[in-house]
């Protein structure tokens, strides 16, 4: 609101303020409200807020630097395991399996891609981010997260190349798509899984 009232400029020096800042605040507020509506005044709400806030931070850090810092991803893994130790989104064995499988899946994709092409298709931070998502939501949600992130990432990547905003050799960070898929899985993962399994 203040950004709009000030017409996108600092009140003191009139330096332009990027629209990104109010958009991040709006996104954070909307997702926080969605967490509150979905989980109510429970331990799950605290866990969901930590999860969502960390994913928002990681998204914009990755867009800026193409890095997912260990200082956020690794504590997020442990936070997910700790939450599920005391009754979180899944049971502890599923959370542990989610962290391990999440890491190993992208690690395997990374090395397979590197052996075939000689290039690095993603960074180690992506492995740790998927491990953190698995630690919070359990291994059962990993197929949903991988599918959603791959579909969105491929669609956006193709669009950016077609409209020439990116060259074919310019790396596109995968972290934001994993983060978006993690948020979708938090709110809709059970429904997606049930719908998918019901189709078979």
Image (cartoon, grey):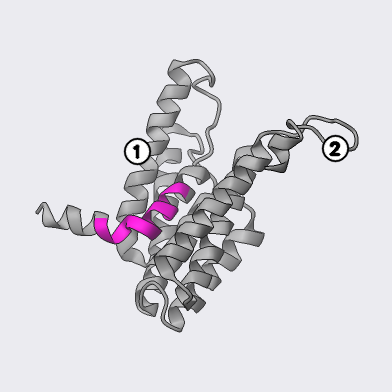
Question: Which label belongs to residue 151?
Answer: 1
Residue 85 lies in the magenta-colored region: no
Residue at image mark 2: 11
> x, y (%) of residue 182?
43, 54
> x, y (%) of residue 114?
46, 39
Q: How far apart, in angstroms, are the residues tagged by discs 2 and 1?
A: 42 Å
The residue under the point 42% across, 76% down is 88
User: Can the viewer see residue 128 in this picture?
Assistant: no
The residue under the point 30% across, 54% down is 143
> x, y (%) of residue 96?
41, 73
SS at mark 2 in the image:
loop
Lateral position of residue 146 relative to residue 42, left or right:
left
Where is the C terminus found, in terms of image quarters?
A: bottom left
Label 1: few (<14), some or many (≥20) within 10 Å?
A: some
| Depicted 106 relative to depicted 138: above or below | above
Task: Looking at the picture, tell me which residue is in the foreground, 69 or 100.
Answer: 69
The magenta stretch spans which residues?
180-191
| Depicted 184 relative to depicted 159: above or below | below
Q: In which quarter of the image is residue 95?
A: bottom left
Label 2: few (<14), some or many (≥20) within 10 Å?
A: few
Foreground: disc 2 or disc 1 = 2
Q: Quadrant of residue 34?
A: bottom left
The residue under the point 34% across, 65% down is 139
| Depicted 62 relative to depicted 118: above or below | below
Closer to the N terminus: mark 2 or mark 1?
2
Check contact, mark 2 vs mark 1: CB within 8 A.
no
Dominant secondary structure (helix, strand or loop) of the stretch shown in magenta: helix
The residue under the point 52% across, 33% down is 172
SS at mark 1 in the image:
helix
Task: Looking at the picture, tell me which residue is in the foreground, 185 or 79.
Answer: 185
């Amino acid at each position: 609101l203040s950004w709009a009232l000030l017409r996108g400029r600092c009140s003191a020096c009139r330096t332009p303020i990027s629209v990104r800042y109010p958009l991040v605040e709006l996104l954070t507020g909307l997702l926080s409200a969605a967490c509150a509506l979905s989980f109510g005044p429970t331990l799950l709400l605290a866990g969901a807020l930590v999860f969502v806030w960390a994913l928002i931070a990681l998204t914009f850090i990755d867009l800026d630097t193409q890095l997912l810092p260990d200082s956020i991803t690794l504590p997020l893994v442990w936070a997910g395991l700790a939450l599920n130790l005391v009754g979180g989104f899944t049971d502890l064995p599923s959370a542990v399996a989610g962290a391990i499988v999440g890491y190993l899946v992208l690690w395997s994709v990374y090395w397979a891609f590197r052996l075939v092409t000689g290039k690095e298709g993603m960074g180690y931070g992506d492995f740790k981010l998927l491990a953190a998502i698995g630690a919070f939501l359990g291994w059962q949600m990993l197929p949903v997260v991988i599918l959603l992130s791959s579909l969105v990432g491929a669609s956006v990547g193709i669009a950016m190349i077609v409209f020439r905003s990116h060259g074919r050799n310019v790396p596109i960070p995968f972290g934001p798509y994993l983060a978006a898929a993690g948020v979708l899985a938090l709110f809709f993962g059970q429904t997606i899984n049930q719908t998918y399994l019901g189709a078979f």
